[in-house]
Amino acid sequence: MSKGAVRLHRTGGGSRRLRRATAVLKTGDRLEIHYDAGLLARTVPPAELVADHESYSVWNKPAGMLSQGTAFGDHCALTRQAECHFTPRRPIYLVHRLDREACGLMLLAHRRRIAAAFTEMFKQHRVDKHYRVMVRGNIEVLGARGVFDQPLDGRPAHTAYRVLDYDSGCDCSILEAHTRTGRRHQIRRHLDRARFPVMGDPRYGRGNRNAAGLQLAAIRLAFLCPVMNREVAFELGARKAERGEEDPAFIRHPSSAF
């Protein structure tokens, strides 16, 4: 229960997670107990609060953390960690997602109106999203800059990139990717189709294993703030550099990951 793997479905409709054994059951209510010993025993590093604007917050999600929970639990999900972080508790609205294996910046809304505004902004591609990615091979053979626009799952998909570095010793490139659409695993699938798979990707590509895990980090979010009505931007690398700290989500020279 404490890890979010028990749900109560009421007779008259509606359902919720049960955290404690205090609910009084009525005739016709249904309990769902989702048990997976491996998942319940799993732990992840804590997420870092990057910025708090009360009606929304920005977080640095570590690799391995889910964006939101599943029926089998939510103790390893960003939404649950954020819910427990604030006192008093705030509503948590997920407005976009980041792959479990990836790390980096994510937005969470805390008011329904703000959540609706962000959802519409993501839908209309008015949120500027940038990623730092390490791939196998010298992607500069395709050009120092380029665009992948092959449809994914029958829907338009657009990924632009620019090469930042190449290490011939390990045959890896570092690039910055920018997406205008948000298809499932979009960057990973586009790069795999181009035969430059993301290093450490457990699902796509061959010969791209990496002990450090998936080398894909969401490093920048920029948008028109629905609260202050002005452009704002959040950047992991720049923010950490100002404080003179190492940033685990900021992929540097290719050889540093081996």
Image (cartoon, rainbow, N blue to C red):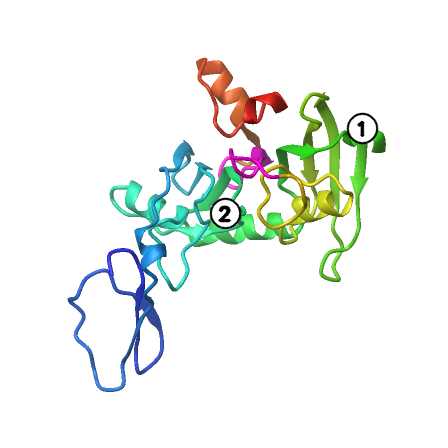
Residue that numbered label 1 is attached to: 140
Residue that numbered label 2 is attached to: 100
Q: In this view, does 19 lie to the left or right of 180?
A: left
x and y percentages locating residue 41 in the rendered image: 30, 52
Secondary structure at numbered mark 2: loop
Q: Which stretch appears magenta? A: 209-228
Determine crowd level at label 2: few under 14, some 14-19, many 20+ residues with C-alpha closer than 10 A: some
- Residue at position x 76%, y 42% from top? 195
Marks 1,2: beta carbons within 8 A? no
Could one spot residue 110 in this view of the protein?
no
| Depth check, front residue: 137 or 68 | 137
Q: Disc 1 residue type?
A: Glu
Separation of marks 1 and 2 at Cα, in angstroms: 28 Å
Question: Split into 4 quadrants, where in the image is the C terminus?
Answer: top right
Determine crowd level at label 1: few under 14, some 14-19, many 20+ residues with C-alpha closer than 10 A: some
* Magenta-span inclusion, residue 221: yes
x and y percentages locating residue 10 in the rendered image: 30, 78
